[in-house]
Image (spheres, rainbow, N blue to C red):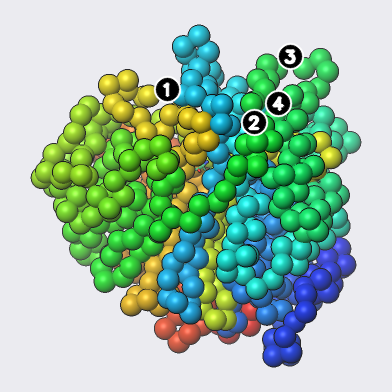
Amino acid sequence: MSNARRLTVLGVTAALAGSLMAVPAAARTAAPRPGPAVPGSTPAKTPVAVGYGGAVASVDADASAAGIAVLRKGGNAVDAAVATAAALGVTEPYSAGVGGGGYFVYYDARTKTIRTLDGRETAPRTATKDLFLENGKPIPFDDAVTSGLSVGTPGTPATWDSALKKWGSRSLAQVLKPAEQLAAKGFTVDPTFRKQTADNEARFRDFPATAALFLPGGKLPVVGSTLKNPDLARTYQELGRKGVGALYHGAIGRDVVRTVQRPPVRAGSTRKIRPGALTTADLAAYRTLGHAPTHTTYRGLDVYGIAPSSSGGTSVAEALNILEKSDLSHLTEKQFLHRYIEASRIAFADRGRWVGDPAYENVPVKGLTSKRFAASRECLINDGKALTSPLAPGDPRHPTPCGTTGPAAPTTYEGENTTHLTVADKWGNIVSYTLTIEQTGGSGITVPGRGFLLNNELTDFSFAPANPAVHDPNLPGPGKRPRSSISPTIVLRHGTPVLALGSPGGATIITTVLQTLVNHLDRGMPLVDAIAAPRASQRNAAATELEPALWDSPLRKQLEALGHSFKLNPEIGAATGVQRLPDGRWLAAAEKVRRGGGSAMVVHPAP
Ligand code: GLU
């Protein structure tokens, strides 16, 4: 949400303070309070904040404020991350919420270990590899998006529940309270929200429950008006009271299943809406998974990410290992971009061949993240000439210098958008959490009476292999998790935090995280500038996508002379991060401009 987004009601912040549980006396300090916790104030929206006591960075000021309120009351980073995520379900309902899934990466300061939760949506147990085929042919992508067919079992409520039970210090009811209040009292519509609604208007109109919620009075919401979601407030209340069993075994789940199986379409709509096959048994069978994180070293640091079913951790690690072979700090901008683009191209070629749901595919995680494999792939890079895509994959199980294995396959299409939040607390714990309902607006289908949109995450599966001669590890299957690009990342030095970050943006997530990391670690940019810098995204496609500042730069011609080709992408990603400064302060960083600017906050500002 953009800067125009504010809490509109005095009661919301009062409620934040009042609802947040029994607070240990020691935590009730008279420390200076940043705007959001003062009743009646507007949460300040700034892309960078520095200070003590913990930090939150998200795309939205109300959401960051919800997390800060929890931290201030003595909650830890996990409690605050869930509170922030639930608030994003209110103010960023087209990107995240109860109807979606995500990946949660946690640094535990006491044990100095990284733990993860895979809260990815799963396909129905009846799904086959033909899920998106009709008469042997893939159905149109947009038809699949707006359908019951693409709705996976939501993983977000289970993620919140698992995270709190394993590492939190507050109950689900306690941390959902700020978001419940926000949904009940409403938030102020800003230009980003209005535009996202306008982009979805036609399909939203076809679902009365969606139109009633997001097209108040049958019209696009007006910038500056208050949008309330009392149904979602009740849903949060019910989840808090009864636990997430209300969704996985109870009435909310039955409503989800009914909606997927018989999407409630407007009478007279000509849109063909395919139903889905999700059942209450699918919901009952859902579990979050706690895989070991991916790990690689990078210039003496330890970089941890999320393991498959996301391809984020392995792909970021592989590209970093390739780039580690160059001294990026001394390259010209042209040389740097060339190498960055090539490393990313190679990592995507390998991701396409090797990464899928590990419950169904033998994913060589160790090989993909190994220095030996990276060396065998780095030798393909020629400083005088760009590689061409699709590039064939290598074999991480048996790396051979400059070797490839089998034919090349282009990268299959993935839709965009979701949201990332990064939280740190006064004990040094960190959460890097990306959550999504897949496209902006997900399936477009709101569960009637429940106030949340259903995901279309199953469109992250390949509908059919891009090249039938190449094994595709990401075809649909029963109970299978579609491959993600989500890349929540935490960087440590000798077991202590350096920084954490992540981004939305579909498959561009991987390149955004990679580029931000090297901008900061190698190119000397402060974290907030590393996030703001113009982005390029190469994903084993003929053209590399460039944001306008790079598109309009002389660098484009210089790189074209090496054989690169480009296409314009107006905006790539919306990253957030936190950094531990050497003196112990936290720095929270978010976008300066993208998505209307993000919101970085700390508990006790000390710039
Ligand atoms: N569905 C995407 C993924 O899991 C995330 C959506 C997005 O970020 O745009 O990779």
Q: Is residue 467 above or below residue 120?
A: above
Residue on which disc 1 sits:
464
Question: Disc 2 or 1, which lies upstream in sequence?
Answer: 2
In this view, the mark in front (3 or 4): 4
Q: Is residue 417 above or below residue 427?
A: above
Q: Position of residue 396 (x, y in %)?
A: 22, 45
Q: Secondary structure at mark 2?
A: loop
Res. 278 mark: 2
Contact check, label 1 and label 3, Cβ < 8 Å: no
Contact check, label 3 and label 4, Cβ < 8 Å: no
Which quadrant of the figure has residue 270? top right
Question: Disc 1 or 3, which lies upstream in sequence?
Answer: 3
Res. 73 mark: none
Res. 261 mark: 4
Residue 15 falls left or right of residue 537: right
Q: Position of residue 14 (x, y in %)?
A: 84, 72
Q: Amino acid at mark 4?
A: Gln
Q: Is residue 70 above or below residue 260?
A: below
Q: Which residue is farthest left?
A: 401
Q: Is mark 1 within 8 Å of ligand 1?
A: no
Q: Is mark 2 within 8 Å of ligand 1?
A: no
Q: Secondary structure at mark 1?
A: loop
Q: Secondary structure at mark 3?
A: loop
Q: Amino acid at mark 2?
A: Leu
The residue drawn where x is 54% and y is 19% is: 140
Q: Amino acid at mark 1?
A: Ala
199 vs 96, nearest the viewer: 96
Gap in angstroms between the C-alphas marked 1 and 3:
27 Å
